[in-house]
Every structure is written in C-alpha cells, then in structure tokens.
Amino acid sequence: MRTVSPFPIESQTSPRDKAFLLAAQRLIRDAAPAYDYLEIGSFLGGSLAPFLADPACRSILSIDERGRTLADERGARFDYAGVSTQSMLDRLHQAGLPTEKLITHDGPIDTLAPPDRPFDLAFIDGEHTDQACFRDFLWALPLMKDDSAILFHDSSLVYKAVGLITLLLRKQDRPFALLKNRNSEMSAIFLGGLGQCELGRYFEAGEDCADFYAASEIAMLEHNIRNRVRIGPGAERLVSFTIEPPRAEKGYY
C-alpha cells in the first residue's frame, strides 16, 4: 500500500523541521479534540498541507505578505514576486488537498481583522528579521488560546526576537516553556498548560538555549560579512573594506 506524504508540496523546511511540526500537531491534537491553526508565511503552502488533511483541524488562517522583496537578517533581501495566493491554492488543489477551511490574508498580521475564534497552534515563518518576527508574535499572541503553542522557523535568523519574546512573557508573568529543536531551524513557545505537559512524549531533548543564541550570533555575523562586506587593496599595502547595502536575491527557485 502506497504511503501518502503529509508534505506533498515542496517547502523551505528540512525533514527535521517537518518532523517537529508534525510532533506539535500531535501534541495539539491530544490536547484538543478539534483545533484551529494560524500560519504566518505560507509561501507555496507546503506547511499547510498536514493541517488541511487533518479532520481534527477545523479552521486555518494563512497570512502572507505576497509579492514583496523581504528584508532578512542575513544582510540580503529575498524576492518572492510571482508567488501569489492563487498559485498557492492551485498547488494545494493539484495535491488533492481540500481548502474549504482555509482563509487567506495577503499582508502583514497587523492589518488583519480580528478572527472569529482563537487559535491552538501558530507557525511564524514570515519575514526573517527580528523586528518582523517580534511584530508577528505581538499580534499573534492575543489571538491564541491560553493553552497553545507558537512555533518559529529559521530560528537562528531571528534568535534576538525569540530572546525578546521570552523576556516579554516573563515580564507578563505568563507560564511558558521554550524548546529549540536540536539540529533544525525550529523552536517553539508552549503557553499555559502546554508548557507544563510532558513535552518529551512528543519532542526529543532540545538544544541548550545559551548555546543556540551564541551559535546564531556567530552565524549571522558570518552571513553579513559574506553578503555585505567587500575587501580590497588599501593604501600602503593595507587591506580596506566597504559595507554595501543588502542586495536583492531570488527567494526561491
């Protein structure tokens, strides 16, 4: 019997990223017989697929700033022109996925009208800058249930935002747990009762957060040196360098 993949559409997530997303889905499904899913940054719809196919998921809100060249903490700008909501829907339909429970919003989350119901699970994978990630979290947090989870992709790119988010939650005296998936770009904030549950039933042991922040800082410096620093000969046999503005690159192939 042929096994159907939960991810029939290409995405910018690794196999370990996908496994983490599915583990979070299992956790939410065990915590709530029916759940609602929020996603920021859907691209071609790859990470929407397992939720569209899940009968326990009763509604999905997909938010994406379509047709833009997005800033990025790596010192580049990534062009996603040509990927529209309709092209995403076409791929979902070609994969045989139902889209009746899917609502889309083209634009940033701070331009969204309040949705009808709160969400159990959110996945933030939009513009990869600390400011945008923090904004997405600030606007998503009031839309979440008290016991819910918010996942982040490309965590090493927005590690400063993740750190600020934990400070905000501590200041608000909100119970939470932070888990950074080892050897992948996924991390998650588990709010309320979910942060107190036995996460080891669903996820492997996470990466030490101090190590994660330190490694991410080095990686971002290396990216920015490669993308923005140009080295050339200087006076008196010295080496000079210039720092260029971020260059635009194709965001997908």
Image (cartoon, rainbow, N blue to C red):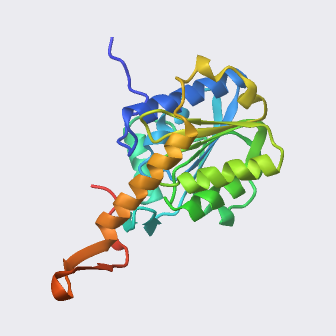
> What residue sits 45% from the left and 46% below the top?
45
Judge left or right: residue 116 versus residue 4.
right
Q: Percent position (x, y) of residue 24?
A: 58, 30
> What residue sits 47% from the left and 36% below the top?
49
Q: Percent position (x, y) of residue 232?
A: 19, 79
Judge left or right: residue 246 versus residue 170.
left
Any part of residue 155 in sight: no
Judge left or right: residue 127 versus residue 14.
right
Nearer to me, 108 or 223: 223
Q: Is residue 194 above or below residue 198?
A: below
Nearer to me, 101 or 149: 149
Answer with the quarter of the image where residue 130 lies: bottom right
Answer with the quarter of the image where residue 228 lies: bottom left
Residue most toward the right? 173
> What residue sits 39% from the left and 67% below the top?
75
Q: Is residue 112 above or below residue 45?
A: below
Nearer to me, 23 or 58: 23
Q: Is residue 2 above or below residue 39?
A: above
Numbered-mark total: 0
Q: Percent position (x, y) of residue 163?
A: 62, 51
* Quadrant containing the C terminus in the rendered view: bottom left
Any part of residue 231 in sight: yes
Judge left or right: residue 101 versus residue 97.
right
Q: Percent position (x, y) of residue 66?
A: 48, 63
Residue most toward the top? 1
* Quadrant containing the N terminus in the rendered view: top left
Residue most toward the bottom? 235
> What residue sits 80% from the left and 51% below the top?
171
